[in-house]
Image: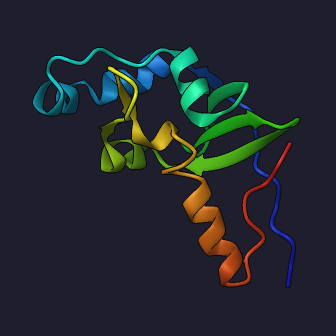
Amino acid sequence: MEKSKKPELVGEKILIEYIHKILEHKRRKTFPNLPLASEEEYLRANKSNGLEIIKNPRTGLHYVIHLKEGEGIIVPTPAEIFEKYGITSLQGYDRYFATALLLQFHGKPCEEQSRKIGGAGYDRI
């Protein structure tokens, strides 16, 4: 089996607020009284020490990078996934979160499934 090509992590760094703006219409409909989660709340919810989003200008693909335990887990994320996964609330938080930025919903389950069927999982940096 041929090894997959490492993702091209070049492009524009995207702020969490940019993703929240894409999902604002869902927040108003689903969680009208809850504010946006902060970067610190994402880090706490993901049990990570960093979260970066890079948009490749050539492909339009977003790379959500979760910095955890001395490595970065690179989760390739097409723009439409942010809209498809939408928003969620988490127990213990009075905020809403973009589901695709939460490792436990978009990242970990997909990687585990990939490994079950013989894949290598996500690239690490």
- For this view, does 70 lie left or right of residue 31? right
Give percent across and percent down for residue 61. Answer: 56, 45
Q: Quadrant of residue 40?
A: top right
Residue located at (38% from left, 35% from top): 90
> Total of numbered circles in the picture?
0
- For this view, does 117 lie left or right of residue 69? left
Residue furthest to the left: 29
Residue located at (71% from left, 75% from top): 115
Nearest the viewer among 70 and 10 is: 70
Q: Quadrant of residue 9?
A: top right
Q: Is residue 18 above or below residue 89?
A: above
Q: Is residue 81 above or below residue 36?
A: below
Give percent across and percent down for residue 18. Answer: 43, 20
The quadrant of the rendering that contains the C terminus is top right
Q: Is residue 23 above or below residue 120?
A: above
Residue 45 visible in the displayed image: yes
Q: How is the image coloured?
A: rainbow
Residue located at (66% from left, 84% from top): 117
Give percent across and percent down for residue 17. Answer: 43, 16
Residue 15 visible in the displayed image: no
Nearest the viewer among 9 and 96 is: 96
Residue located at (37% from left, 34% from top): 91
Q: Is residue 120 above or below residue 125?
A: below
- For this view, does 8 lie left or right of residue 31? right
The quadrant of the rendering that contains the N terminus is bottom right
Give percent across and percent down for residue 99. Answer: 41, 41
